[in-house]
Amino acid sequence: MDIEALFRQAADEAARYRNSVPDRLHRPGQDYAAASAAFEEPLPEAMSEPCAILEALVARAEPGLHLMTGPRFFGWVIGGSHPVGVAADMLTSAWGQNAGNHSAAPAASAAEAISARWLLELLELPRESSVGFVTGATVANFTCLAAARGEVLRGQGWDVDAQGLFGAPPITVLIGDDAHTTVFSALQFLGLGRERVIRIATDEEGRVRPDAFVTALAAIEGPAIAIFQAGQINTGAFDSFAELIPAAKAKGAWVHVDGAFGLWARACPAKCPLAAGIEMADSWATDGHKWLQTPYDCGYAIVRDELAHRRAMTIAASYLPLAQAGERDPSHYVPELSRRARGFATWAMMKHLGRSGIAELVARNCHAAAEIARMLAARDGIRVLNKVQLNQVIVRFGDGLAPDAADRMTQDVVALLQKEGQIFAGGAAWRGRQVMRISVSNYQTDEDQAEIAAEVILAAYARVSSGMA
């Protein structure tokens, strides 16, 4: 096998695709059915030539790729997979390191260790905290809440890691009514239940109401976990950490913060005040493949109590090496043993952008979101429903029409935009009504791209409202 030719071909195809981003539509050229048909074939009986396989993969996959790396992809809060991170990730694949432990993969473990230190410094979180490099915020929430579950039950004299939940004292979980669905999934996976929680009333921006939280807190006894949010998925709003966390701590509750994208506000001086007090929590979940722009998959589970973190996650066996003093074993902080060496891409992106570059990227995206909101709100019949504090904008079309008619118009505008592909934005339900969600989190999105996006949205609205779509 000619490895140089094979890898060169892969690099050439990757560069060609990324260089073509400005000319591509922000939607897939094929739907799932067409993509499935393109890949459909019997199980191969014989070997195939490597370069021909890459050609076939590109030909079959590329028409069904969504332009998630595009500057006007606003469908979900995802980063643009920055080329520096992608290049580091290519090397990660080529190096083939299983980052399960420090002895098997010294360089991968060292990259994680320094990246973890940088991350805590950048986000202004307690320096004694431990960091697990996981797939994303879903598993980060799971990991942090596993540590929380173990620690609050340990305070009751129960070792959940050894004995499980059968016969354990019940844990009360308090969570905002507008928390992200992945947090509920984490609670489900941990045996704490999606519905066996106390849901706290929220305000018009999706923030936990302090009065409702204090009332609910006063009524509970025994071990408790309180879950707050940095960056509500629709509005971008932040819970009032400086008020809520001390109240929870006074009751002995473990405090976890889902900060999948909002935690990165801590890296931006202009936005840092939104997250004031967040450092008082016990654990935090965030993503690298959002505002740090690492490739998928990359998330971080951050826990103040390193021992609680290790107790919940450590995988031990006689054939696995033991960490010596001063050594960090990556498998002690994540639920996987065999896993990708995510620290390399994280290290590369933090090295490339630095503190100032990350701050500027966050500020630029937030400014772009505000500019889109400003331009849309200036048009009659369009209503921006949230206070745009971060990178999220939710919009409703047909303001002044009957609610059902405005729902239909909003859905029609979203559908037209997705069909034409000049931008990509998604729809959602907010407070029982249809909205368009705009999530700005790509390293290429600036004020110029924001103006293009707003003009495209306004044109689509004009066509829908005039019945020409």
Image (cartoon, helix red, strand yellow):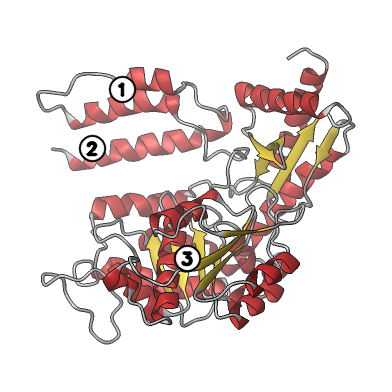
Q: Which residue is label 2 attached to?
A: 5
Q: Quadrant of residue 424?
A: top right
Q: Are marks 2 and 3 in contact (CB under 8 Å)?
A: no
Asked whether, in this view, residue 65 is left or right of residue 165, the answer is right
Picture residue at 83% right of the left edge, 38% below the top = 383
Q: Which residue is label 3 attached to?
A: 351
| Amino acid type of the residue that numbered disc 3 sits on in the rendered structure | Lys
Q: Quadrant of the C terminus?
A: top right
- Residue 115 visible here: no
Label 2 SS: helix
Label 1 to label 2: alpha-carbon separation: 24 Å
Picture residue at 41% right of the left edge, 19% below the top = 33
Q: Is residue 142 positioned above or below 322 on the image?
A: above
Q: Nearer the viewer, residue 176 or 440?
A: 176
Q: Which residue is label 1 attached to?
A: 39
- Characterize the local packing of mark 2: few (<14), some (14-19) or many (20 or more) Cα atoms within 10 angstroms: few
| Amino acid type of the residue that numbered disc 1 sits on in the rendered structure | Phe
Label 2 to label 3: alpha-carbon separation: 30 Å
Q: Horizontal and vertical percent for residue 192? A: 44, 60
Label 3 to label 1: alpha-carbon separation: 38 Å
